[in-house]
Amino acid sequence: MSTLFTNGHKIDAHGQVDNFWMLVDGDTIIQTGTALAPRAETVVDLGGSWLVPGFIDLHGHGGGGHSYDDAVEDIHAALAVHRAHGTTRSVLSLVANPVERLAQSLVVIAELASSDPLILGSHLEGPFLAFPRRGAHNGTFLIEPTADAVATLIEAANGTLRQLTIAPELPGALDAISTLVAAGVTVAVGHTEATYAQSRAAFDRGATLLTHGFNAMPSIHHREPGPVVAAFDDPRVIMELILDGLHVDPHVAHLAFASAQHRVALITDAMAAAGSHDGDYALGSLNVSVRNGMATLRGTTTIAGSTLTQDVALRTAIEKAGIPAHEAVEALTHTPARALGLGHRHGLLAEGYAADAIALSGSWHVERVWAAGVELAR
């Protein structure tokens, strides 16, 4: 069935277009323009709203009181929360656990991805992390990336392991990066003590992502630039940012956008409390307290994921970090798509792209959401 979206103001990575219309057939955009619009079986009058591509979250752990490493019904419930906030495609992140437990979770996610195209696959944020930079990961489950462990996880995911975070200074890490990249996995440097040189070595082996930049890694020092500057310097690398105003100051976010132009991906790193309320939660095997929207490991000041949704990240980027709207939208859409090798199909409102779109108010709040050409309930 064909659907015509009309009377909107389009913003995507290619910029702003007023009086925009878009023709969709099934799950694909087949034509766009600004002149006389074609006929269609269904017409959606946007009433002058902003129309942007659906958000893509590379890195999130749950929402609505549910986690992605729980039962299938919990995963669906968590996804529904983020979809209502404009996230049309999601990578489901898992915290550190024993390899056997992670393999079981990967099998579940692979089965879900086979029936739900809005689930892009899985992200292993552990277990190959540096103990001193473990953050909200159980240190008991952190291991070195042996060939057997890497092979077990790749096999369990059955082609749906989208990304994996690794500390490149660990023994065997560089060889593991090569193996993972050869298997089609996007490898991220993160939860690491890596130097600039060690980070560059990882990027030269094929790592192309930095997990939640500035967090769980050495900060920028004038004599020890570390992984953040290594990512800034390498045009092959995309940097994740958690732009909730807590993980990264908006002024620092502005610096990142300027230093890595078209290479910032805004993620949520959301845990179960996203879209829910303050209280006590679990993140994997660890207990988390959420107070005033900030999640910390219970009894500590260690940040444990976020309570962020991607529409809030968009508003923070535009209103607090001073990022131009089309660059902020790009960081939620086309850049994360490119990070996963999907930039030819996702993240733009253009012919041949997936029919994922969000209608936003003038104040950047979500009004309506479509994914694969179907409007999602709010």
Image: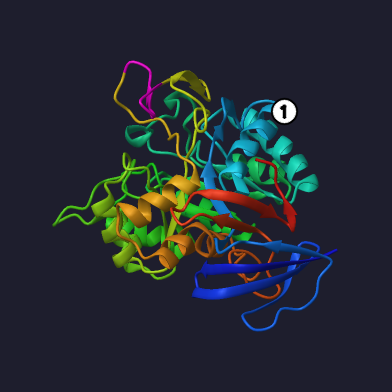
Give me the residue at 59% from left, 27% from top.
Answer: 66
Furthest toward the front, the residue is: 47
Q: Position of residue 377 (x, y in %)?
A: 70, 42
Q: Any magenta on residue 23? A: no
Pick whichever, 347 or 37, lies toward us: 37
Q: Amino acid at mark 1?
A: Glu
Query: If the image is split into quadrants, where does the N terminus sit?
Result: bottom right
In this rendering, would 270 be left or right of 151? left
Dominant secondary structure of the residues highlighted in magenta in the image? strand
Query: If the image is split into quadrants, where does the C terminus sit?
Result: top right
Q: Position of residue 358 (x, y in %)?
A: 59, 56
Please name the residue that numbered disc 1 is placed on: 73
Pick whichever, 22 or 210, lies toward us: 22
Residue interval drawn in magenta: 290-299
In this rendering, would 78 be left or right of 324? right
Would you place residue 194 above or below residue 256 in this image? above
User: What sort of colour scheme is used for the picture?
Assistant: rainbow
Give me the residue at 39% from left, 29% from top.
Answer: 293
In this rendering, would 372 be left or right of 161? right
Q: Any magenta on residue 292? A: yes
Pick whichever, 20 or 195, lies toward us: 20
Helix, strand, or loop for circle 1? helix
